[in-house]
């Protein structure tokens, strides 16, 4: 659906399967190249200038919904440790428009987090999940929550790597859970993250999250719980800066 200024988002249900016939590719031949690019990207990409907290609330649990990222400079409500501005970001790892959103808005959002203007809540949802894409969206989302259990910084690197190396929505083959685990390790995740990913701990949560949050298109952005219509990164920055009182 076209949004403001032509910004488009992916909606439920997923695209008609008839388009897939013209878009099948010889994935196996390029899989090695993609894997190498992914590893190099994770190893060379810098951290966002933030200090992170794990999944909203405490550490991730089976009931977790978002990964909260803040900085030590966070502007809070008077007499409280709660953020004055919460920027909620709903994304699907297979959504091409989400990858575009990350390219266009990601650096600005990173700056807003680092300056303390916002607390960012990342909701990784699965509106494009389908047997035809091997449920890539929910598997990738589940893996991301597993990484967030270990480290928010690792989550941000994992998140960036998956969007930077996003598979075509209509590919014949998609990254496996073992490949997700390898990317997670390159992103800096340690401990039992691989077991969490291979066990698909957050799969059901990711599959249900769009419904429970009332989201039917990605990317969706909310500011303090209210839907925000995307136009430009500069407009978003002005809006949240005003709300933060800066």
Image (cartoon, helix red, strand yellow):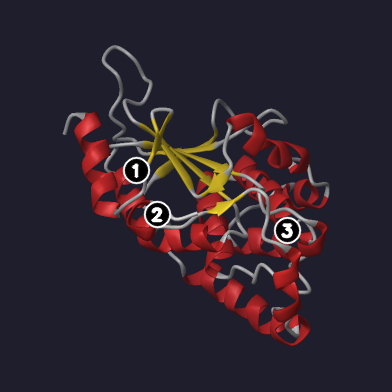
Q: Is residue 178 visible?
A: no
The residue drawn where x is 58% and y is 78% is 37
Give residue 136's mark.
3
Name the mark nearer the viewer: 2 or 3: 3
Distance of label 3 from label 1 (alpha carbons): 28 Å
- Which corner quadrant of the image does residue 10 belong to? bottom right
Image side of residue 76 versus residue 156, left or right: left
SS assignment at label 2: loop
Bin the neighbour count of mark 2 within 10 Å (Cα to Cα): few under 14, some 14-19, many 20 and up.
some
Q: Where does the image place residue 169, in percent across and percent down from the top left?
A: 66, 67
Image side of residue 66 versus residue 171, left or right: left
Residue situated furthest top in the rendering: 79
Q: Is residue 15 visible?
A: yes
Name the mark nearer the viewer: 2 or 1: 1
Q: Are marks 2 and 1 in contact (CB under 8 Å)?
A: yes
How many numbered badges does the structure rendering display?
A: 3
SS assignment at label 3: helix
Name the mark nearer the viewer: 3 or 1: 3
Q: Where does the image place residue 26, in percent across and percent down from the top left?
A: 75, 85
Give residue 113's mark.
1
Bin the neighbour count of mark 3 within 10 Å (Cα to Cα): few under 14, some 14-19, many 20 and up.
many
The residue drawn where x is 44% and y is 58% is 102
First along the sequence among labels 2 and 1: 2
Circle 2 is placed at which residue position? Answer: 48
Distance of label 2 from label 3 (alpha carbons): 25 Å
First along the sequence among labels 3 and 1: 1
Distance of label 2 from label 1 (alpha carbons): 9 Å
SS assignment at label 1: helix
């Amino acid at each position: 659906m076209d949004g403001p200024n032509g910004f488009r988002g992916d909606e439920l249900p997923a695209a008609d399967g008839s388009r897939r016939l013209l878009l099948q590719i010889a994935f196996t031949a390029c899989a090695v190249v993609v894997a190498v690019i992914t590893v190099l990207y994770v190893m060379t990409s810098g951290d966002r200038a933030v200090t992170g907290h794990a999944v909203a609330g405490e550490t991730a649990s089976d009931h977790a919904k978002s990964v909260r990222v803040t900085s030590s400079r966070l502007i809070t409500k008077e007499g409280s440790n709660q953020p004055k501005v919460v920027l909620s970001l709903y994304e699907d790892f297979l959504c091409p428009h989400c990858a575009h959103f990350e390219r266009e808005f990601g650096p600005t959002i990173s700056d807003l987090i680092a300056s303390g203007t916002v607390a960012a809540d990342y909701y990784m949802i699965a509106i494009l999940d389908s047997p035809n894409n091997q449920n890539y969206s929910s598997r990738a989302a589940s893996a991301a929550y597993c990484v967030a259990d270990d480290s928010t910084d690792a989550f941000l690197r994992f998140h960036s790597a998956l969007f930077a190396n996003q598979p075509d929505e209509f590919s014949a083959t998609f990254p496996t859970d073992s490949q997700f685990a390898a990317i997670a390790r390159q992103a800096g995740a340690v401990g039992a993250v691989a077991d969490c990913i291979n066990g698909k701990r957050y799969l059901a949560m990711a599959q249900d999250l769009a419904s429970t949050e009332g989201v039917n298109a990605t990317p969706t952005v909310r500011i303090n719980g209210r839907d925000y219509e995307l136009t430009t990164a500069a407009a978003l920055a002005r809006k949240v800066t005003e709300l933060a009182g800066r």
